[in-house]
Amino acid sequence: LFFFSCGFLLLSLHILRAVTALEEKIVISKLGDNATLSCIYPGKEFSLNNLRVYWQIDDVQEQCSVVHALISGQDNESEQCIHFKNRTQLLWDRLGDGDFSLLLLNVSQSDERKYKCVVLQTNEYTKVVHQAQVVLSLAASYSQPILSGPVRNSNSAGEEVTFSCSSDNGYPEPNVYWINRTDNRRLLPSELNITLHVDGTYSVLSTLKVKATSDMQIECFIENKRLQENISANYTQEKQKNGSNTESHKDLEKSGRGAQAAGIISIVILIALLAVLICWLWKHRSSKLVSYTGNEDLHLCDQI
């Protein structure tokens, strides 16, 4: 019974260790970026010359599954899939520490797969000493949404109006939400169009039809769950009373223009008055000089 218990315990530990080694890690990378797939070998003492490291696509249906191979401390590209040629790198300064993580360059949708790292030791015989699985998920941020709504007339309350919300260059497909901010109520879109582009990204266009009110506050959300991003745009219609706000705004514009014109005219009049005053002073001074010169001549004549 004792030996049975010990054997069962060792078997359980072995199974637990295997499960732990094959625990999936999820890596999220943006399209066009470089992604690091983690693989850390926990062995304390080892020689790279006695190890083989294989990165491969974890799918038995793949005709070519080799992503990267390291044999006896050297890269081996003989069996590498064409899709990964010149796009994979190991972290050479970390290999001695058992870090066999793979750097995958310029990722695209076709790289969105499950990968397996297998470390084999080739001392006396070849055996698997470590495995790791990594799921690569790709994403791209959506552009700031553009929300367009109708130009509201003062008498349009109660009429049906249409809003549209658009965003581009995102991945994967987004969730789109409409919210009425006056009561924080979610609104159902009237139409939702998602378009897939050649580069693998999506654009989205959603429309909403609602009854117009005097104080509409509509907000559109574009959610990218994978990146945990939620960007929004809003439309706010300020309340007006029988067009009084619009008229008063126009009156203010008119009065502002009138005040500006009056200011210009006042400046022109002031400049003209200054010119007249200067001319009058100049003439007055000139007449005094002439009068003074004439008196001096008379005195000289009397002396003669």
Image (cartoon, grey):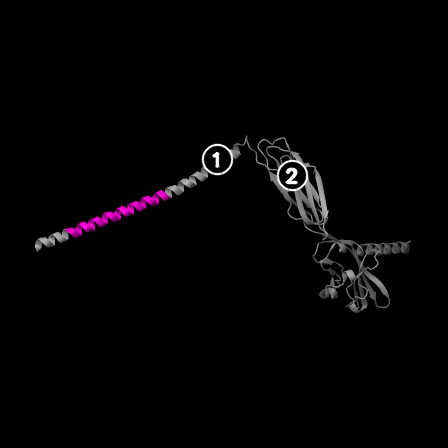
Residue 91: image quadrant is bottom right
Query: In this picture, which residue range is highlighted in magenta?
Result: 268-294
Q: Is residue 155 above or below residue 28?
A: above
Looking at the rendered structure, the secondary structure element under dot 1 is helix
Specify the amino acid type for callout 2.
Phe
Query: In this orientation, does residue 284 appear?
Result: yes
**With 82 as the anchor, is 302 left or right in this view?**
left
The picture places residue 83, in percent across and down from the top left corner, at: 77, 60
Residue 204: x %, y % from top left: 69, 45
| Residue with the mark numbered 1 | 251
Q: Is residue 285 magenta?
A: yes
> Residue 39 versus residue 237: which sits nearer the camera?
237
- Number of numbered discs overlaid on the protein picture: 2
Q: Nearer the viewer, residue 57 or 123?
A: 57
- Residue 301, x across and y down, in percent: 10, 54
- Work out whether 131 lies above or below 145: below
Image check: 12 left or right of 40? right
Q: Which residue is mark 2?
A: 163
Q: Quadrant of residue 99?
A: bottom right
Q: Residues within 10 Å of mark 2 (few under 14, many from 20)?
A: some
User: On the rendered image, what quadrant is the C terminus found in?
Assistant: bottom left
Residue at the (74%, 65%) spot, across then down:
95
Cβ atoms under marks 1 and 2 closer than 8 Å: no
Residue 111 located within the stretch drawn in magenta: no
| Left or right side of 245 for 26 | right
